[in-house]
Image (tube, rainbow, N blue to C red):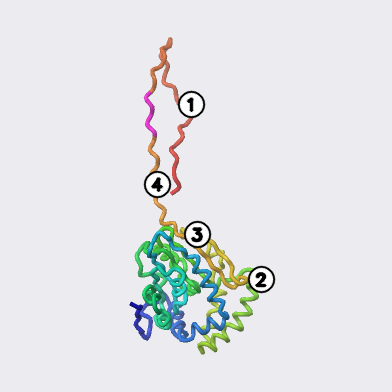
């Protein structure tokens, strides 16, 4: 049965703070022209970026029906691409804007409607069980969360051991060419084309500001490692205009029991000597049993 979604006038997820409320309201305003703006501004490049990044999810083939989350799903372009590449997976399309999800409902045709479930949610408090996901994908969304460390901890909580996190994002550029390209594009093309597509100038002046105030890709990689992710990899796309970052959740580290101390061997009978020798002290300190890294 195709997924169904109510159309409330406002999102039923409360934002975590005033910044979140502003961003939530803004995306609700531009939902009607969001897809059109993306296509016009990128000339279809965003479609290629998504296709390439989604391929990095690679859920465990041993799981016949993996569960994947498209976080900050918006109008569900990424959700549909995830379904196209991994049709056996159940996909949760999560976003804190009900208007954005509602706008993308028409994309859920055929098998996509059976496998993709739209659900309003806050990235800071995911309404999902611990270790319940085989992968998380997020395209152009983490830049808008209010508390990135908190959201990252939630992603780690919900991933099963071996689960993959894949992020497609505009990070703050640090080298000359991407900085020049971002400056030219964000100050001219983005606000003008965004306004033509949505008639909302404020939203498309916020977006370039959010890039300039966001983390660098190196800082984000460091954050992932600090939260316990491993195999963290980042790759620049289109001259560094965007980045795809992938990481694996190894699961919470658990203490490994130490190897048992070897029992002392029964001493052999000593050869009789003229005088009873005193028990000899060991020639050196006894090596401790090896400890595993915790």
Mark 3 burial class by Cα count in 10 Å: few <14, some 14-19, many 20+: some
**Label disc, if present, on residue 87 of the rendered structure:** none
| Residue occupied by mark 3 | 225
How far is the residue under mark 1 from the one under mark 2?
64 Å
Q: Which residues are magenta?
A: 262-266
The mark nearer the N terminus, 3 or 2, is 2
How far is the residue under mark 2 from the one under mark 4?
48 Å
Q: Residue 246: image x %, image y %?
A: 51, 64
Question: Magenta stretch containing residue 146, yes or no?
Answer: no
How far is the residue under mark 1 from the one under mark 4?
31 Å
The mark nearer the N terminus, 1 or 2, is 2
| Residue occupied by mark 4 | 256
| Residue occupied by mark 2 | 176
| Of marks 1 and 4, the one in the foreground | 4
Q: Secondary structure at mark 3?
A: helix
Q: Are marks 2 and 4 in contact (CB under 8 Å)?
A: no
């Amino acid at each position: 049965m195709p997924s169904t979604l109510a159309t409330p006038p406002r999102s039923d997820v409360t934002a975590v703070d005033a910044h979140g409320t502003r961003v939530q309201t803004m995306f609700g305003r531009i939902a009607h022209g969001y897809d059109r703006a993306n296509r016009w501004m990128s000339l279809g490049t965003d479609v290629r970026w998504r296709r390439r990044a989604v391929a990095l999810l690679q859920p465990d083939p041993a799981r016949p029906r993996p569960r994947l989350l498209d976080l900050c799903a918006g109008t569900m372009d990424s959700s549909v691409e995830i379904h196209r590449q991994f049709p056996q997976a159940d996909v949760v399309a999560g976003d804190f804007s009900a208007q954005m999800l509602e706008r993308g409902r028409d994309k859920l045709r055929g098998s996509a409607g059976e496998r993709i479930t739209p659900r309003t949610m806050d990235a800071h408090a995911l309404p999902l069980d611990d270790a319940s996901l085989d992968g998380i994908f997020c395209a152009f969304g983490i830049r808008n969360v209010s508390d990135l460390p908190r959201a990252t901890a939630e992603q780690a909580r919900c991933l099963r051991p071996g689960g993959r996190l894949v992020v497609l994002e505009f990070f703050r550029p640090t080298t000359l060419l991407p900085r020049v390209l971002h400056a030219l594009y964000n100050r001219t093309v983005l606000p003008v084309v965004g306004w033509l597509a949505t008639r909302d100038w404020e939203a498309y002046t916020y977006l370039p500001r959010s890039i300039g105030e966001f983390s660098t890709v190196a800082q984000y990689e460091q954050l992932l490692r600090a939260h316990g992710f491993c195999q963290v990899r980042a790759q620049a796309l289109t001259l560094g205009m965007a980045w795809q970052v992938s990481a694996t959740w190894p699961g919470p580290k658990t203490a490994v029991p130490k190897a048992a101390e070897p029992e002392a061997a029964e001493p052999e009978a000593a050869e009789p000597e003229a005088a009873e020798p005193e028990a000899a002290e060991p020639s050196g300190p006894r090596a401790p049993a090896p400890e595993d890294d915790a």
